[in-house]
Image (spheres, rainbow, N blue to C red):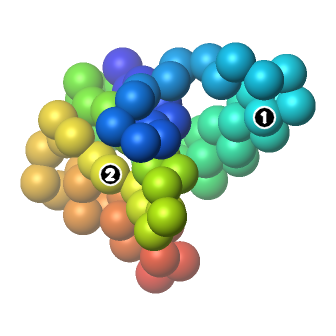
Amino acid sequence: MVQISYSYKNREFLQLEDALLNQLAQTGKTLLYALLEPMQDALLRENGKIRINLDQHPKIELEGFSIGVKEQIEMTLRGEA
């Protein structure tokens, strides 16, 4: 199972406190799941976490994925797959 969370100033959120921000966050999760849908079979066998870091330099961190799946996710996010 893959979990998607947001991180801001070293705090991790599964659901943001502000209603508008939470709606944007849920939309972002939905879009990320749609982007990774072609990899669904591989992701079902994984137990990883995708953390979307919203600090000054936003980035996406991948934790707990096997090397092959991690590389495949990174390529998809860069638009190479």
Q: Residue, x 85% and y 22% (percent of image)?
A: 19
Residue at the disc numbered 2? 61
Q: Nearer the viewer, mark 2 or mark 1?
A: 1
Q: Nearer the viewer, residue 25 or 12?
A: 12
Q: Residue, x 22% and y 40% (percent of image)?
A: 63
Q: Residue, x 78% and y 23% (percent of image)?
A: 18
Residue 74, image x, y percentages: 35, 65
| Amino acid type shown at disc 2 | Glu
15, above or below 39, in the image:
above
Position of the N terminus, as image quadrant, is top left
Q: Residue, x 13% and y 44% (percent of image)?
A: 66
Residue 5 located left or right of residue 18: left
Callout 1: 10 Å neighbours few (<14), some, many (20+)?
few
Q: Of label 2 and label 1, which has the lower sequence position?
A: 1
45, above or below 40, in the image:
above
Residue at the disc numbered 1? 21
Q: Nearer the viewer, residue 40 or 53?
A: 53
